[in-house]
Each structure stands twice: as structure tokens, then as C-alpha cells.
Image (cartoon, rainbow, N blue to C red):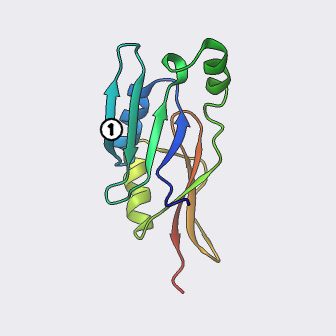
């Protein structure tokens, strides 16, 4: 039986720049970093205190050319993920100060306060503070 979600993968063009964005701008921590002789890099990041790891995957050195090109065509086209915070205004201000690009202004919804931001590849993420029930 399934036990838990362990990893989700984001296709990236450059692991180094993706690592910099996710750690320096969003505050993630490196969970695993292993470079292989082939040039492949197993690189995962995660939020402090959370088990799920995000694999920052540059398929160039992992797969044959055709497969790698198909995966690279998906860069920036990931489904939107929702990142929850309990300090929306502080998190929003910190991300903006670090240069994170928000594609919407903060707004209040029936379920909470939200704003959409993009990573360096154009993947969209929702920053949300749930409404108090």
C-alpha cells in the first residue's frame, strides 16, 4: 500500500540556477545533492520541517536525447502548486524583496488570502494563507 508522497519532480534547464532560486529566494533547504561522473545531478530540496522533497531535474545527462528534449519541452509548464503560509504579508514581502516575480497582487478570497508567483522557468505557484474558520 502507498504510505506517503516522497518526491515531486520539476524539470529545470539548469540545476545550479534552480538551486539558487529555491534556496535563496524561497528558503528551501538542500536535502540531497549527488553529482555523477556522467554529469547527472540528483538534487532535491524541501521546506524545513516538511518531508516532501522536490527533485530539481535537468534531464540532459539522465536520459537519451529524444527523451531529454521531451522533458525539457515541459519546463515551465508544471501544474500550479499551492504553498501555504501562516504569515502571508510577511512571506509576500520577503519574497518580493528577494526578487520573486508575482503575477497577481494579493487578494482575499472566501478560503483565504492569496497571490500567484512564478519561478525562474515560468512555473506558477499560489502563496496562500487559509482563512480562519
Q: Residue at x 41, y 13 (%)?
A: 38
| Placement of 56 over or under 2, stated as above or below | above
Report the side of 46 relative to 115 (left or right).
left
Q: Quadrant of the C terminus?
A: bottom right
Task: Report x, y in % for residue 40.
Answer: 42, 20
Q: Quadrant of the N terminus?
A: bottom right
| Residue 16 picture quarter | top left
Task: Report x, y in % for residue 104.
Answer: 61, 53
**Number of marks in picture:** 1
User: Which residue bears the numbered disc 1?
Assistant: 32
Q: Is residue 106 visible?
A: no
Mark 1 burial class by Cα count in 10 Å: few <14, some 14-19, many 20+: some
| Placement of 51 over or under 19, stated as above or below | below
Of all residues shown, which one is farthest toward the front? 1
> Circle 1 sits in a helix, a strand or a loop, which is it?
strand
Of all residues shown, which one is farthest toward the bottom? 133
In the foreground, 13 or 103: 13
Q: Is residue 116 visible?
A: yes
Task: Report x, y in % for residue 98.
Answer: 37, 44
Task: Report x, y in % for residue 123.
Answer: 59, 41
Report the side of 11 relative to 29 (left or right).
right
| Placement of 66 over or under 76, stated as above or below | above
Q: Residue at x 50, y 25 (%)?
A: 58
Q: Residue at x 40, y 30 (%)?
A: 42
Amino acid at each position: 500500500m502507498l504510505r506517503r508522497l516522497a518526491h515531486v519532480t520539476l524539470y529545470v534547464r539548469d540545476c545550479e540556477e534552480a538551486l539558487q532560486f529555491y534556496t535563496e529566494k524561497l528558503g528551501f533547504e538542500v536535502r540531497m545533492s549527488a553529482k555523477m561522473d556522467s554529469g547527472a545531478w540528483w538534487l532535491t530540496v524541501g521546506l524545513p520541517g516538511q518531508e516532501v522533497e522536490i527533485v530539481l531535474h535537468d534531464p540532459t545527462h539522465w536520459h537519451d536525447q529524444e527523451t531529454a528534449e521531451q522533458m525539457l519541452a515541459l519546463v515551465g509548464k508544471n501544474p500550479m502548486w499551492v504553498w501555504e503560509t501562516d504569515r502571508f504579508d510577511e512571506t509576500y514581502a520577503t519574497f518580493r524583496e528577494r526578487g520573486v516575480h508575482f503575477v497577481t497582487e494579493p487578494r482575499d478570497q472566501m478560503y483565504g488570502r492569496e497571490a500567484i508567483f512564478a519561478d525562474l522557468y515560468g512555473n506558477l505557484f499560489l502563496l496562500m494563507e487559509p482563512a480562519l474558520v
